[in-house]
Amino acid sequence: MFNVEMDYHMSSWKKTLIAGFISYIDAGSIVAGASGLSMWQDYLGMSSVQMGLLAALSSNTGGAAIGALIGGKICDKYGRKFVYNWALLIYMIGVAIICLATNYPMFLLGYVIIGLMVGADVVASWTFIAEEAPAKNRAKHCGSAQIAWMLGPVVVFAASIPLNAAFGLLGNRIIFAHLIVVAAWIWYQRLKMPESGEWEAAKKKEAELIAQGKHKKVTYTDLLRGRSLRTVVLCCCVYTLWNIAASTNGFFMPYIYEHVGKLSNTMGLLLTCLNFAVCIVTTVIFMYTADRFNRRKIYAIFSGLGMISWVVWVLPADLLQTWMLFFFTIVWGFSMQQQFYQLWSSELFPVRYRATAQGFTFFVTRFVAAIWGFAVPIIMETIGFQVAAGLMIAFVAVSWVAGSIWGGDDRGKTLDEITKERYGNEVDDDGNLVTCELKHSH
């Protein structure tokens, strides 16, 4: 594709860091708009419906959902490297459109493009990281991508405070422009990376099975049966339901701090930045515990704390005090659903449709978030944010219960070992699915 010499001796950590930096521009894309949402609303004259549509089709929700669904299938068919190189190129075009936007359709188009590309790239990159990581340190490697995800909001919100104050909307355009520079650097570094060794081995084995007449194409119908269906449900419960609250936090929270919490724009940005800084600390804890201790117990403790934090927003707006908003900001940062979702969705599916499965669950998550994102401004305008907060507590509670009871604890096992334990006779000695008849677990 491009004439750049690949580094076949690249360390697993270097591969992880280069692949995982997509999470920085994923989160950066979401919060760059969030940090200037009030200014864009004034400049473009956006109604609550237009704001909801923007949230529903952005990289935070619907755009990423469709991108993940399509990207996952392409990723399993043509390789992880194919997807994440092309996706970044098109992503940069989308960000450039936002930087130059002078009307609402232009602004929305840019968001749709970056959403599609982020969704495809995240699936390819997260799958690649899990496949290239050492078995004994898989959580640590997966967690590094989450560090990059949390770093995006910290950098963007911290930079937005002086830029918004000094330049207004131009400052927010500068924030978006820096994502092009970061994406260009990541794209060039990725050109030097080899393809996933596990994917290449699986494709070679697939060719042998085809020649022997033992291979059958996996479809979404097969994905939604037996043990595979149980894993899909687990991932969706853990990630989809939690992400309803997380997507609200990522896209609307500065706006909510201002309009519900009655804080200034600067204070709202500071608290949002603080929240993601706490998330970085939480992810470091995840990296150094999830490979050593029972994962379900770790998940239960930290994700339970995150659930409790939203109680603050159920209170009437006139009872909210600054210390309560600080409590929410810090305690919500302890949630670990996204870290565990990345780990479990990469571990618990066979290599032949690992990216497809992750893309499907990512699609469900962001699609649900798209519907919710469209509804949030309307709910706030009609019946109040307290109702939305109560619903989010219920969703996060189900997520907490699902991961605490049914989450996997496969520390130190290779991906092949996990596949054979979960799927039994339908995989061969190399961990490749040889039939679509998935074993039902009783």
Image: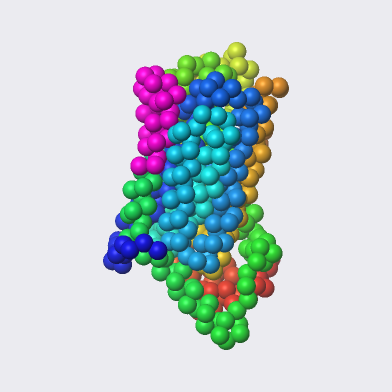
- Note whether residue 318 is visible: yes
Residue at the extreme bottom of the image, as rendered: 212
- Seen in the picture, residue 426 relative to 222 is either above or below; the reply is below
The percent coordinates of residue 228 (x first, y second) are 63, 63
Name the image quarter holding the C terminus: bottom right
Our reading of the magenta stretch's main secondary structure is: helix
Q: Quadrant of residue 319?
A: top right
* Residue span colored magenta: 154-181
- Residue 153 lies left or right of residue 12; in this view the side is right
- Note whether residue 408 is visible: no
The percent coordinates of residue 313 (x first, y second) are 59, 24
Residue 277 part of the magenta segment: no
The percent coordinates of residue 199 (x first, y second) are 46, 68
Name the image quarter holding the N terminus: bottom left
Q: Residue at x 62, y 20 (%)?
A: 315
Q: Residue at x 57, y 61 (%)?
A: 73
Residue at the extreme right of the image, as rendered: 383
